[in-house]
Image: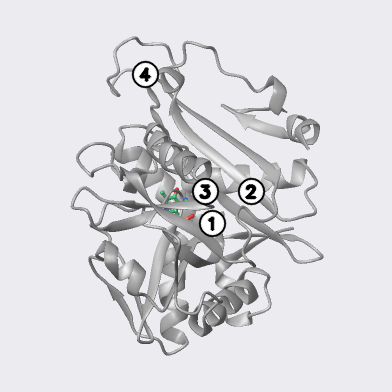
Amino acid sequence: MAEQQNDTIAYLNGNWAPLSESVVPINTHALQYGTGCFEGIRGYWDGEQVNVLFMREHFERLASNAKMLMMKSPSVDEMCQIAIDAIKKNDIKSNCYLRPVVYKGSFELSPDLINPEDHYMCYVLPLGDYLDTSKGLEVCVSSWTRLGDNAIPTRAKATGGYMNSSLAKTEAVLNGYDEAIVLNEWGQVAEGSAENIFLVRDGVLITPDKTAGILEGITRQSIIGLAEELGYKVEERPVARTELYRADECFLVGTGCQVSWVKTIDRREIGSGQRGAVSEAIQEAYENAVYGRDASKSSWLSPVK
Ligand code: PMP
């Protein structure tokens, strides 16, 4: 796998080269200070072609986050084309994952975002499931607090901000859990280390609102739409920690984890400890959409021809 990954042809500042040769100097601003922002985008193999999920939405988010962080990305159209070229050049015939990054690529000592040059990279890797979506996740509430909007905005998907996710995920794994749920600066539920979270209580879906210190997840938004189409009411509102333990169902959503149902939180069984009916309906609807089996969701997918 590692060998295969190093053979990937990657895009870096206008050049295509194997990943192993696509390197940045050790004094790069983004390496020193985490001054970048990125995306994670999935492509699904339908047996004939790769379909990139929410491609434009991801690159629009990247362009807008780069702007917030005083970086300039290539245009959305250019980034879409580079992503398609990456899949084609690597002749990808499986599910895959694209990782585009806008970052400060020059060598200034000062951490400011004004002077360093903006660079852009994008590479693609074959990728199956990030979390095991079948068996039910065992998650914990992290002792690490989610970054605040006035510290490093989670909304920005900033490279440096992922130390916060790394600490939460590491603690969870070292303590025998699959994933962590982080609380925000007000002690309310924010999200997973790299996923948004939904609870189900009395048939209603509940998810923290966009001011809760979360990433404005593209999957989250699509799940809200799917749930409403399926006839469920969705509430976006502050979520207290102990609502987690009272939930009938809980699931995490994101590009990586897709829809992953939660079996226990802090060793307390959620509902019956089995995948609940709502989680199942949402997971199925999502899978049908991303694998191109639901014609009404064809706008979610960009086929790579
Ligand atoms: N929250 C965080 C912190 C994430 O890193 C991710 C993954 N990008 C998500 C939520 C899910 O976002 P999306 O559905 O846009 O992948």
Q: Nearer the viewer, mark 3 or mark 1?
A: 1
Q: Where is residue 195, by image quadrant?
A: bottom left
Asked whether the viewer can see residue 57, the reply is: no
Q: Is mark 1 within 8 Å of ligand 1?
A: yes
Residue occupied by mark 2: 97
The disc labelled 1 sits on which kind of residue? Answer: Thr
Give how far across and how far down residue 148 sits, in percent.
Answer: 24, 43
Q: 10 Å neighbourhood of mark 1: few (<14), some, or many (≥20)?
A: many
- The residue shown at (58%, 79%) is 285
- The residue shown at (56%, 62%) is 258
Q: Is mark 4 within 8 Å of ligand 1?
A: no
Residue occupied by mark 3: 77
Left of 35 or right of it: where is 183? left
Asked whether the beta carbons under mark 1 and mark 2 sit within 8 Å of each other, the answer is yes
- The residue shown at (49%, 44%) is 175
Q: 10 Å neighbourhood of mark 2: few (<14), some, or many (≥20)?
A: many
Q: Nearer the viewer, mark 1 or mark 4?
A: 1
Specify which label sits upstream in the sequence, 3 or 4: 3
SS assignment at label 2: strand
